[in-house]
Image (cartoon, rainbow, N blue to C red):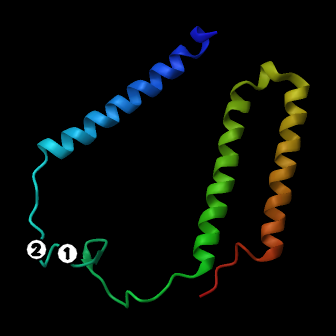
Amino acid sequence: MISTYAPMFLMIFVALALAGVFFLGASFLGGKLKKTEEMMMPFECGSDSSGGNHLKLSVKFYLTAILFVVFDIEAVFIYPWATQFKNLGWNGLFSMFGFLAVVIVALVYCVKKGALEWEN
């Protein structure tokens, strides 16, 4: 049974080891920058920041971002199904129809609630 999960554990170990090597390499080999006043100033996309930093972002921004992530992840589940479509047969087709029905109902609910409307 361990031979079934060995490649997965090996991949996780290699990923963690590589991340550790990169982190330690950046910590020990990277140069230390002196924090100057100019370096500590906020900027937006390479230009000076305009507007107040005390303004809060609208909740609609966060709601839209969360909904994007949720529907994006659901779309990711369709790809493995599409690659195995021929092997899954009718049962796989009807299962995907059920999954898509739930996604569509959730999307219609979000639209009805006005979660996707962007207002200033």
Residue 42 is left or right of residue 34, and the answer is right
**As rendered, which of 82 and 49 lies closer to the eye?**
49
Residue 53 is left or right of residue 3, and the answer is left
Residue visible at 64% across and 52% down? Answer: 72
Residue visible at 68% across and 31% down? Answer: 80
Q: What residue type is labelled 2?
A: Thr
**As rendered, which of 13 and 115 lies closer to the eye?**
13
Residue visible at 73% across and 24% down? Answer: 84
Q: Are marks 1 and 2 in contact (CB under 8 Å)?
A: yes
Residue 90 is left or right of residue 46, and the answer is right
Give percent across and percent down for residue 55: 45, 88
Give percent across and percent down for residue 119: 64, 85
Q: In which quarter of the image is residue 96?
A: top right
Q: What element carries label 1?
A: loop
**As rendered, which of 11 and 84 lies closer to the eye?**
11
Q: Quadrant of the image for the C terminus?
A: bottom right
Q: Is 16 placed above or below 87 here? A: below
Give percent across and percent down for residue 54: 41, 89
Callout count = 2
Q: Which amino acid does label 1 sit on?
A: Met
Q: Is 95 placed above or below 46 here? A: above
Residue visible at 85% across and 51% down? Answer: 102
Residue labelled with disc 1: 40
Q: Is 106 placed above or below 53 here? A: above
Residue labelled with disc 2: 36
Q: Is mark 2 on a helix, strand or loop?
A: loop
Give percent across and percent down for residue 8: 53, 21
